[in-house]
């Protein structure tokens, strides 16, 4: 085995070793979080480092396909792919995972002796999520998806004695399993239509489309539609978003940021891999469907966020709307991948930061966060109040915040390439107009949150001091939100190389 | 070309298929519609048994016997244990289903999905006869799993590890405080 | 006219639709869960039938992986259901109404 052959799966290996180390240390040294916590932190940081090494390898010697039979060339039937998409995804997932883990640090203390299990599930889920974007094989994408889903079902229900947590876990489990089954049937029908389970390499789906004219497209359409529905479920795009508000609200606040952010990163990366790269020849078929999903998500997410009274539900519906804006970028096909990456990587930090602040306000093991909990936050805790203000402004897409650059990038991308339906040279202009309108409407509830934070508090009680890791997580998220809003060029340069092969 | 019923039944593969399809479909139908949970589980056994026999008739012996061992052997037992622990109602209960205003759209949605997919399948695959009963050597499957599919094999081990940890974390009694 | 791969595939589509209808219509947690198992089983049937049709073994291997996943899902799912419903009298989804908005 040559040294380089480990690099493509280094991210997963580091996380798996980290998860096992956490469990072992907890058994040997004791269940106090001080003993095994560093191991988990090292694993998240090491995973991000593995992503950096992959990125360097890809930019010096190019992307590659890996792991097949002995004696059979890699190009023939690959199982792992290392390219711009997977390497950039590894860096983002590693960093977001690290920050999300810090944000969950207070929750770890509250779950008592079961802390190591919680953290090892987070580590394993991250490995599965990266597997989704680092493989050309549709079955392996499903396996990665299930690794993450099964871990997250448990994390959502970790506080068994709270009704909300248990209910959230159960709803997530039933609807998530349904989505997985739909995605898998889509894979099976695509297998039936193309005779291949792999996107690249010999006898692949791409080969099939380059050598065959599809005369009976019915079964292929059904397969693509079902896969799209499965992914839309996971990234909570409307009309497949119904689980998101209930799950976000019921799950322990300290861990929601991690779950919501990482699953979106991996879901959109998998969308780019399967549809952008693998089914690139069918681009005229699937972009109109993606455009409709994007439109419905923006409208449903924004309008329903307006009428919520719970901040977690509000952020959940805002997540639905953000899924719509990211899908807007993907209507450009594979050309939309840079805009997708810019949006999803900055938005992920905002989500982690936002939920981290909520966990310091209402308790990391809370399942409900009524808007009143934020009342007068800026006076009660200026640090948390101002950082939360930055994060919310970032989500709302105000100029000089990362959300603004992300939205502009996404809208420009959607109009850059000609659209197949309705056929024109300006791309999905109607979608962009709708997106701008919905961004303006959305300001209403973002400013409702900010207004509540700046109002006079009912009681002058000082906010309970949050742990140092949680504060660090919030500061990092807010800094990223502001920094990439003012100086977005380094990230824009980077995402231009983050393409799937 | 007209084919008489008698000719049709001369083909062993045909009546084997029909013989297996009827219990598989009926079992699935009753699993979904039965008002008695224990009966639902037992009908699921019938449906899965039919499917396992179908895998055998397609030559996928290893998959077929795995269904028997894993599903009928283990998963069904887990379901029965689940019924016992949750003290689910054992008799006839009409309230196990949603009201009819939810039922109709859901049924129509499923039916239309079936019609569309079935139409696509018939459109694409009609008249491609297959040779049933010819078994795939299990060693071929083993070779494939441990050569090309070794990475997914390892990923599956991660899934099982996650399920193991998750199951313990949810079910374990908590002595030392915590939620 | 002898048995073709279409028959198996259409049968699998019928099973899948029944399972989907079951998840949408029933409100007992365990029956919904069994319907999901039916759906996964019909996916396996599709994989194996296509694999037979094309003369590839990949479909059978995929079906085996799906079975492992289904078993893992059952384990976690029942752990969740047991954790929730241990202290309630029935396993009906309607009784879960903590989260509304």
Image (cartoon, coloured by chain):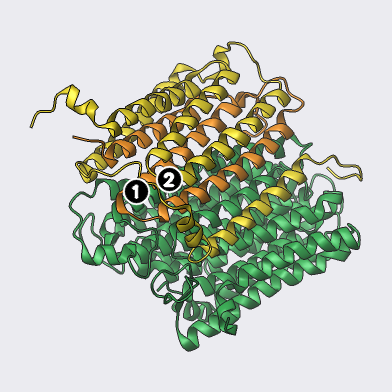
Chain colours: A green, B yellow, C orange
Kindly identify which residue carries mark 1.
Answer: C52
As drawn, the label of residue A376 is none
Between A453 and A206, which is closer to the camera in this rendering?
Answer: A206
Kindly identify which residue carries mark 2.
Answer: B60
Residue at left offset 78%, top offset 65%: A21
Instruction: Tell me if mark 2 has few (under 14), some (14-19) or many (20+) residues whose alpha carbon lies within 10 angstroms of its own.
Output: many
Position in image of residue A342 (x %, y %): 50, 69
Position in image of residue A161 (x %, y %): 79, 36
Q: Is residue A179 left or right of residue B89?
A: left
Residue at left offset 36%, top offset 56%: C56
Name of the residue lying farthest toward the bottom: A60
Between A478 and A163, which is closer to the camera in this rendering?
Answer: A163
Quadrant the C terminus of chain A occupies:
bottom left
Tell me, yes or no, whether dots 1 and 2 are on the same chain. Answer: no
SS for dot 2: loop
Q: How many marks?
A: 2
């Amino acid at each position: 085995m040559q040294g380089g052959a480990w690099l493509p799966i280094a991210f997963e290996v580091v996380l798996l070793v980290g998860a096992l180390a956490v469990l072992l240390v907890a058994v040997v040294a004791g269940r106090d979080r001080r003993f095994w916590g560093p191991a988990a932190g090292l694993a998240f940081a090491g995973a991000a480092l593995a992503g950096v090494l992959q990125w360097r390898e890809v930019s010096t010697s190019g992307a590659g396909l890996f792991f097949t039979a002995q004696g059979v060339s890699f190009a023939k039937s690959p199982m792992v792919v290392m390219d711009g998409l997977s390497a950039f995804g590894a860096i983002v997932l590693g960093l977001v995972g690290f920050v999300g883990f810090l944000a969950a640090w207070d929750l770890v203390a509250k779950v008592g002796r079961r802390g190591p299990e919680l953290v090892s599930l987070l580590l394993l889920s991250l490995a599965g999520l990266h597997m989704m974007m680092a493989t050309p094989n549709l079955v392996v994408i499903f396996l990665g998806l299930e690794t993450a889903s099964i871990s997250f079902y448990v994390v959502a229900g970790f506080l068994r004695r709270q009704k909300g947590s248990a209910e959230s876990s159960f709803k997530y489990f039933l609807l998530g399993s349904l989505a997985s089954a739909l995605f898998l049937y889509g894979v099976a029908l695509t297998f039936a239509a193309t005779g291949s389970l792999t996107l690249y390499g010999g006898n692949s789906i791409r080969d099939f489309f380059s050598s065959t004219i599809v005369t009976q497209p019915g079964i292929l359409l059904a397969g693509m539609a079902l896969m799209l529905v499965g992914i839309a479920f996971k990234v909570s795009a409307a009309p497949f978003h119904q689980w998101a508000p209930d799950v976000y609200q019921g799950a322990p606040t300290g861990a929601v940021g991690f779950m919501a952010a990482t699953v979106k990163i991996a879901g959109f990366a998998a969308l780019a891999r399967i549809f952008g790269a693998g089914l690139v020849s069918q681009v005229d078929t699937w972009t109109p469907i993606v455009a409709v999903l994007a439109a419905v998500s923006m409208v449903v997410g924004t309008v329903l966020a307006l009428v919520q009274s719970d901040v977690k539900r509000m952020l959940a519906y805002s997540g639905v709307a953000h899924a719509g804006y990211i899908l807007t970028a993907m209507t450009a096909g594979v050309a939309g991948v840079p805009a997708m990456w810019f949006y999803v990587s900055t938005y992920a930090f905002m989500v982690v930061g936002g939920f981290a602040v909520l966990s310091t306000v209402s308790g990391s093991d809370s399942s409900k966060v009524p808007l009143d909990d934020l009342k007068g936050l800026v006076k009660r805790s200026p640090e948390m109040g101002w950082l939360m203000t930055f994060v919310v402004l970032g989500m709302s897409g105000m100029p000089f915040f990362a959300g603004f650059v992300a939205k502009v990038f996404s809208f420009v991308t959607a109009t850059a390439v000609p659209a197949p339906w309705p056929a024109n040279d300006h791309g999905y202009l109607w979608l962009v107009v709708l997106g701008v309108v919905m961004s303006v409407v959305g300001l209403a509830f973002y400013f409702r949150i900010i207004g509540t934070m700046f109002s006079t508090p009912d009681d002058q009680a000082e906010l309970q001091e949050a742990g140092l890791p949680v504060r660090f997580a919030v500061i990092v998220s807010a800094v990223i939100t502001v920094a990439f809003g003012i100086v977005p060029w380094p990230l824009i340069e980077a995402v231009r190389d983050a393409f799937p092969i | 070309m007209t084919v008489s019923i008698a000719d049709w039944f001369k083909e062993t593969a045909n009546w084997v298929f029909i013989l297996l399809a009827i219990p598989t479909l009926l079992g699935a139908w009753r699993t979904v519609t039965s008002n008695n949970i224990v009966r639902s589980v037992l009908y699921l056994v019938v449906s899965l048994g039919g499917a396992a026999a179908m895998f055998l008739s397609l030559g996928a012996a290893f998959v077929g016997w795995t269904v028997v061992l894993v599903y009928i052997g283990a998963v069904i037992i887990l379901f029965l244990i689940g019924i016992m622990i949750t003290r689910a109602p054992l008799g006839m209960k009409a309230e196990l289903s949603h009201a009819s205003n939810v039922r109709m759209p859901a049924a129509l949605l499923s039916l239309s999905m079936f019609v569309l997919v079935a139409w696509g399948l018939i459109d694409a695959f009609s008249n491609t006869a297959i040779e049933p009963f010819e078994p795939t050597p299990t060693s071929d499957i083993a070779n494939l799993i441990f050569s090309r599919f070794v990475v997914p094999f390892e990923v599956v081990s991660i899934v099982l590890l996650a399920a193991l940890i998750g199951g313990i974390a949810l079910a374990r009694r908590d002595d030392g405080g915590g939620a | 006219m002898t048995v073709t791969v279409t028959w198996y595939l259409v049968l699998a589509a019928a099973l899948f639709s029944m399972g989907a209808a079951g998840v949408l219509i029933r409100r007992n947690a365990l029956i919904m869960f069994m319907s999901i198992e039916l759906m996964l089983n019909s996916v396996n049937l599709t994989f194996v039938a296509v694999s037979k049709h094309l003369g590839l073994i990949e479909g059978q291997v995929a079906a085996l992986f799906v079975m492992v996943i289904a078993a893992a899902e059952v384990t976690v799912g029942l752990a969740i259901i047991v954790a929730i419903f241990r202290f309630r009298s029935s396993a009906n989804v309607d009784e879960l109404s903590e989260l509304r908005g």
